[in-house]
Image: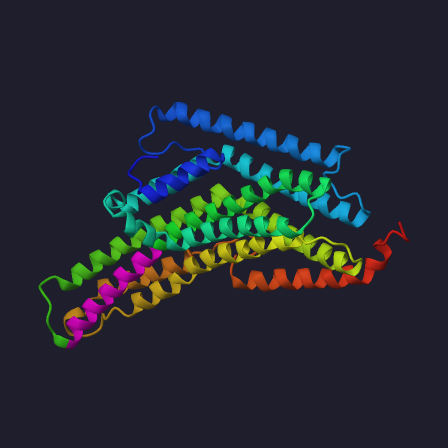
Amino acid sequence: MSGRLGRVLQFHLRLYQVLGFHGLPLPGDGNPARTRRRLMAWSLFLLISLSALVLTCLFSGDEFLYRGDMFGCANDALKYVFAELAVLAIYLETLSSQRHLANFWWLHFKLSGQKVGLVSLRSEFLQFRRYLIFLYAMMGAEVAIHLGLWQYQALTHHMLLFWSTYEPLVWLTYLRNLQFVLHLELLREQLTGLEREMGLLAEYSRFASETGRSFPGFESFLRRRLVQKQRIYSHVYDMLKCFQGAFNFSILAVLLTINIRIAVDCYFMYYSIYNNVINNDYYLIVPALLEIPAFIYASQSCMVVVPRIAHQLHNIVTDSGCCSCPDLSLQIQNFSLQLLHQPVRIDCLGLTILDCSLLTRMACSVGTYMIYTIQFIPKFSNTYM
């Protein structure tokens, strides 16, 4: 990575390096080639270590899995299996998608110029406020619920073994999800900046049309500025493609892991209540309930900007007085076609668009299988085992 990073961005990218999620050296790192090799070796080490941990938990004779009945045991095993799926996707993608990630950051620095190194710390906090709120709200909620829960819940041997091994996997999936949010925020920043500049062009043309005041070559000026904005949009679209190339598989794995955890904890919550089992650790799904909406909100925030850019584009006045210019009209048509054929569509391997409708489908799927679980719960009791 070349260029300059703000302090907030530098700190959080360093955090992702420590977690093995970011395999690129940061600006200022000495000997970038050696740093990259070390980061890749660290990611590989974490992949092997965490996979060994999950296998130990699944096949150990100790109480990593709930031994009270088969239903609880299957729920815990399901959590470990999907956590391992997420770990494999995260670290294998980190090792194999260096080129896409490097291109993303190269485009980011190209579009941002040198502004990132000159802003104040307060401006950086404002710039990344949504990401920071999501990140530290999740961390605070997770820690607070753990501290509160274990004041009232008896810490059995099984719970100690399960949560001491499963909780690190939970944090990894949460932080990877928020890494997606960080990159989407950078993408949204470029799109909203483009929207503001298109709005200024529309205001310039409207003012010139209404007042008849302009300067020689005003039409050519507008056309040149449109060409420039079209190139910027092309770079932003390339950033989107690089983001999808760098994170496609891990997006699917992380969202699936979080969704499975929510689902099985909902099933086990009802099962515990039905069988009068004193177990309150299902309250720990509360942070998980915030994770998928946070990512979907960041994704939706990017996608809704493009129609607003198109609206500002067609607000540019071309057919009156000083702004009458066939070349300008042709340029607007060309830009419109680009917006049509290069939409900002954030999806998951092409399977589903990551917008707010996905939340509805997830809630419906959990509710549907809750109904199935309620119907079969009597057969999961010890009388039937």
Spot the residue most to the right: 383
Residue shown at 35% from the left, 35% from the top:
1
Tell me if residue 195 is in the magenta stretch.
yes
Residue shown at 67% from the left, 55% from the top:
263
Height in image: 184 above or below 105?
below
Asked whether the viewer can see residue 277, the reply is yes
Expressed as whole percent of the image width and height from the top left, the position of residue 352 reads 56, 56
Residue 385 as seen in the image, left or right of residue 314: right
Spot the residue most to the front: 151
Quadrant of the image occupied by residue 59: top right
Tell me if residue 108 is in the magenta stretch.
no
Residue shown at 26% from the left, 65% from the top:
199
Asked whether the viewer can see residue 351, the reply is no
Frontmost residue, 366 versus 253: 366
Task: Give the extent of the magenta segment.
Answer: 191-210
Expressed as whole percent of the image width and height from the top left, the position of residue 289 reads 57, 57
Residue 269 as seen in the image, left or right of residue 176: right
Residue 207 as seen in the image, left or right of residue 240: left
Expressed as whole percent of the image width and height from the top left, the position of residue 126 reads 33, 54
